[in-house]
Image (spheres, grey):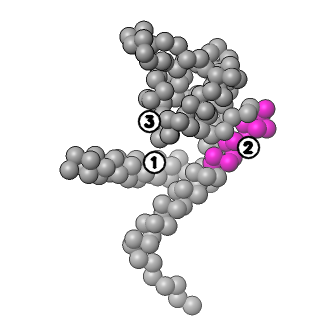
Amino acid sequence: MRQAAVSSPERSFQLCRLIGRIRAEFVDALEGEMNRQGVELNFTQFVALKLLGHEDPMTPVELARALHYNPGALTRLLDKLEQRGYLKRVPDPDDRRALRLELTTQGKALRKRVIGYCDAVATRTFTCTTEREREQLHGVLTRVLDDIREQRAQHESD
């Protein structure tokens, strides 16, 4: 039996769904690994720790933007991380009305551990592919993401 042809828009939507399903499976696998290792973090909390571990402290607004997260929900996420001793809110030296987010020593140690778990899960995720295929996929997806961002910027400037 011959398979019906799939239209280009339908195929594009299927690709978007596939990317979303791969992300969901990756998130589940990483959360499962963290749970097995005794780390009580969800994926978004992990990404927040990862982002906060860069050299310059971030403001809550900067972190919300980087996570594509609602500022109200971010407050709850930050409260949990602070209660667990992973981060602290400190006054901004340049603006006394603002706060900066910094990882504590405990937060930095946890960040290092969970990045290792993430790397291991990512490696397992792509074991069925070759290095060349991963490079090609990275190139294609980077080009798609850059184009999406360019289109958004164009629409926002119109």
Which image quadrant is residue 6 in? bottom left
Residue labelled with disc 1: 138
Which stretch is magenta?
Answer: 26-38
Instruction: Pinpoint residue 70: horizontal percent, then vertical percent.
Output: 50, 40
Give the percent coordinates (x, y) of residue 54: 50, 22
Residue 95 part of the magenta-drawn span: no
91 left or right, relative to 153: right
Please check the rendered image and state whether residue 31 is part of the magenta-colored stretch, yes or no. Answer: yes
Residue found 54% across the figure and 22% down from its top: 53
In primary-sequence order, the first of circles 3 and 2 is 2
Asked if residue 131 is positioned above or below residue 50 in the image, the reply reads below
Q: Secondary structure at mark 3?
A: helix
The kind of residue tagged 1 is His
**Kind of element beneath mark 2:** helix
Q: Which mark is residue 32?
A: 2
Secondary structure found at label 1: helix
Residue that carries the numbered disc 3 in the rendered image = 65
| Residue type for callout 3 | Arg
- Residue 139 in view of the camera: no
